[in-house]
Image (tube, rainbow, N blue to C red):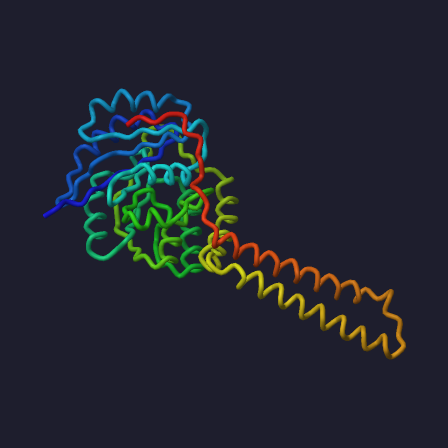
Amino acid sequence: MKQRTVSIVIPFYNERESLGELIAQLDRVKPVGWDIIEYVFIDDGSTDHGFEELKSLRTQAKRNMVLLRFRKNLGKSAALSIGFSHAKGEYLVTLDADLQDEPAEIPQLLERLKAESDLVIGWRTNRRDSFIKRLSSRLFNSVVSRAYGVKLHDMNSGLKVCTRDVANEIHLYGELHRYFPVLAAARGFRVSEVPVTHHARRYGKSKFNNGRIIHAFFDLTSTLFITSFEHQPMQVFGTAGGVSILIGIGILTYLTVLHFMGQSIIRRPLLFAGMMFVLFGMQMVSTGLIGELIVHKRHDPVAYPIAEIVK
């Protein structure tokens, strides 16, 4: 029976100390029926010379390694997006480089993928992170689950496996990697989770900071819009614009009747309100039409600033 090919995509930022041990752990992973053909490392603008460390480790690894380096830090979504585009496997594994997730868990996620899913998340049932990080993650998962109806405990786990179709259809940018399961479910893919072991960070510092909470809020709004109106923007803009126009017309009709009854309407604030409602509505409808044109126009992939590629 033909084995399924797997690429392991690993974005990293200033994780030099953990890279050697990570590769050693990856080399020991041998899932039955699956062929891990490559590791795809994406250096997200590190300043600790981790990329040079990887180039020296590359000759010792038991599997092929593809190395990519951004000129500057662009974030995890950009790193995953470019990693997916360079990976050759039929199935993709994402894994953080901080050693908090065990590569040994990969086979059980692949088996769940084969059995019933298109995307499987590693659920960190006993997270070994700071209290603030665990609390913010719990709130995030609760809010996102209720907002989108995707019942998962750990949306933002770094350990995931998915089919090539999932990776190809979902465009990651900004901080949308946090909503990867939501975006997949919105496109009809089957999403599930498997409990996995989680370890405390041994090297370096966490990349989590309070600014990410603010970014997550805005991305929550963006994701809600994308999942609801990605293909029909006129539904939201046209509806809002239509309601606004109707309110404006109603106000102006009322004032027109008063005018013919001999009352002065020139100095009434209601006149300007009616005009504003109509103008705002027309702008909303126009925005919806432009959105429809954008949806139907294909764009080239984002040209990320890649400084170096080693294959």
Whether residue 270 sits left or right of residue 279 in the image: it is right
Position of the C terminus by quadrant: top left
> Who is closer to the viewer here, 29 or 305?
305
Rendering quarter of residue 87:
top left
Residue for point 33% across, 25% down:
16
Number of dots carrying numbers: 0
Residue at the (62%, 63%) spot, across then down: 241
Residue 231 x, y percent position in the rendering: 46, 58
In the foreground, 279 or 30: 279
- Between residues 300 and 147, which one lies in front from this camera angle? 300
Question: Can you give x and y, in whole percent of width and height, for residue 11 in the image?
Answer: 35, 35
**Which residue in the rendered view is the most extreme toward the bottom?**
261
Identified at 37% across, 25% down, the residue is 308
Which residue sits at x=26%, y=26%? Answer: 20
Q: List x then y, in percent, for residue 212.
A: 48, 41
In percent of width and height, residue 236 lies at 55, 62
Q: Quadrant of residue 286?
A: bottom right
Q: Is residue 74 above or below residue 1?
A: above
Q: Is residue 73 above or below residue 265?
A: above
